[in-house]
Image (cartoon, rainbow, N blue to C red):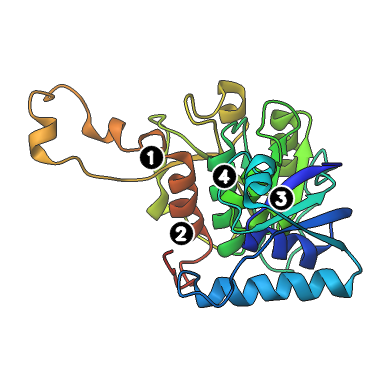
Amino acid sequence: MIGECVYGVGPVLAALSANRREFYVLYVQEGIDLTGNNKKKKDKKAFEKVLKLADKIGLTTKEISKHDLNMFADNRPHQGLVLDASPLEMVNIRQLDRVVENEGAGLWLALDEVMDPQNLGAIIRSAYFFGASGVVLCAKNSAPLSGVVSKASAGSLELTELRSCKNMMQFLVSSAENGWRVLGGSVSSRAVDINEVVTGAPTILVLGSEGTGLRPLVERSCTQLVKIPGNIPVHLSAGLEDVDPQSFVAVESLNVSVAAGVLLHHLAGSKTAVNVE
């Protein structure tokens, strides 16, 4: 394989449609039956679109065995399609542009050292679904934008505006000076309930890594800290009279990708109808 492996019907279709990569070869499982009842109707149509689009752009298509596809995709669910393509490139930025009045509110997501590719993909999927303007990642200590991330994002990785920054603290401070509200997901006692946060302002939502949350300096770079309210059943809190139950139900008590979805839903104005797959 010349480049990197993009696998699965959704990611391959999104990659070909977005045209942000250089394409080398499209590998298709030989003898695959698109008429069988075991394939979703939606996937069948998407599979056919991939083949038509590949033909339209003159992309070399090769039929290979399922075993070889499994090898390319490291035994992950490829659905009979693997695309050999160049890696996605991110533009490095130091700050977001100055907020201009009457141009509408923007919503960006900044991820501080999110290392797990499944979580990163799921977060990007939520960001795309809720209409976020884009996602900013740390140039170092972030999961690479691999085929695993693209698959976990259901192809949203290929369509989302992606940026990187060398210094997350500097990025947040400079963007705040340009008029952006910077909200950090945190379990700090200073964090306010997300439901108390007014929507509509140009906002950067900052989320930290899976294990430790926001780094202290990143947390201090936020203009406000927010948390997700929750409830612990009475039988779980028995014997914890001296412990604040809410300390267990802020951002870190949820998977970071789940927390991202909850927070984005609120900040996006809660207008998007949520479909579950």
Residue 150 shows up from this direction: yes
Mark pair 2, 4: CA separation:
33 Å
Which residue is the site of mark 4? 76
Figure check: 179 above or below 277: above
Q: Nearer the viewer, mark 2 or mark 4?
A: 4
- The secondary structure type at the circle numbered 1 is loop
Q: Which residue is mark 2?
A: 266
Three-letter code, disc 4: Arg
In three-dimensional space, the C-alpha distance between marks 2 and 3, rounded to whole angstroms, equals 32 Å
Foreground pick, 86 / 217: 86
| Residue nearest the viewer, comparing 4 with 132 | 4
Q: Nearer the viewer, mark 2 or mark 3?
A: 3
Closest to the camera, between mark 3 and mark 4, is 4
Q: Which of the two labelled residues, at mark 1 and mark 3, occupies the earlier sequence position? A: 3
Q: Could you say which disc has been placed on residue 97 in the image?
A: none
- Nearer to the camera, 171 or 139: 139
The relative height of residue 261 versus residue 49 in the rendered view (above or below) is: above
